[in-house]
Image (cartoon, rainbow, N blue to C red):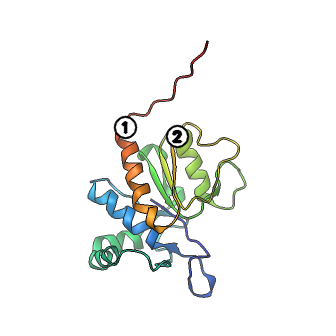
Amino acid sequence: MILIPEKDAGAAQGDPVVRLERAVGPYYVFRDAGVEIVLVSPDGGSPSMAFADSDISTEVIERLKRDRAAIDEFSDTISLDQVYIDDFDAAFCVGHPGAIWRPNSDNPAAGLIARLLDAGKPVAVLPSGIDLDPKGASDGLLIVGDGSKSSVMVAQALLGALHEPHTKPERNVS
């Protein structure tokens, strides 16, 4: 899971924070499915995090508060430059990665997402603030969602993509 802090997340003094309402539900979807989760943030360590949306399930918030292992994982992320795409089957990105195919992108997560898609790996992004020009999803599958309520559905779609064989569509030539 790639955690990208956002400036518009309701944090004090406009400091960027990871929107936990987008991350916690999917985290538990993956964990409950037995998926090994690695949390990644731009600089590693403990990124600033907050619940910016009051619509998140109280049950999920309470589960996180009681889950010391999850709290520790969210507080000890690895940095983007420590990720080797061959070690991962897929990625779930929380936050705006921006322009993924532009070499001068101001978000280093964009380059990681581009490499994952080029390697044919499925990537889910929440919310949909992603610039796909000029290559689209390349050889990968891109799943996009908006809003805190769709985060669990996006995570379930990514799990489904991992369980389906990846094939490129055949072109009919006449």
State left or right for residue 172 relative to residue 101.
left
Q: Given the current orientation, which residue lies at the most extreme right position?
A: 104
Q: Which sits earlier in the primary sequence, circle 2 or circle 1?
A: 2
Q: In which quarter of the image is the C terminus?
A: top right
Residue 39 shows up from this direction = no
Q: Identity of the amino acid at label 1?
A: Glu
- In the image shown, does 78 or 107 lie closer to the viewer? 107
Count of marks overlaid on the render: 2
Instruction: Give the residue drawn at x 56%, y 77%.
Output: 9
Quadrant of the rendered image containing residue 74 = bottom left
Identity of the residue furthest to the top in this view: 174
In this rendering, would 20 be left or right of 14? left
Under mark 2, the amino acid is Gly
Closest to the observer, 156 or 70: 156
Asked which secondary structure carries label 1, the reply is: loop
Does residue 49 appear in the picture of this structure? yes
Q: In the rendered image, which quarter contains the N terminus?
A: bottom left
Q: State yes or no: discs 2 and 1 in contact (Cβ < 8 Å).
A: no
Residue bearing the label numbered 1: 164
Q: Which residue is drawn at 34% across and 78% down?
A: 58
Task: Kindly state the secondary structure of the residue where label 2 is placed.
Answer: loop
Which residue is at 39% across, 68% downward? 24
Badge nearest the viewer, 2 or 1: 1
Residue 109 in the image: x percent, y percent? 58, 58
Identify the residue shown where x is 56% and y is 83%. Answer: 11
How packed is label 2: few (under 14 Cα within 10 Å), some, or many (20 or more)? many
| Above or below: residue 106 compared with residue 164 | below
Q: Give the labeled residue for mark 2.
A: 140
Q: Position of residue 42 (x, y in %)?
A: 55, 64
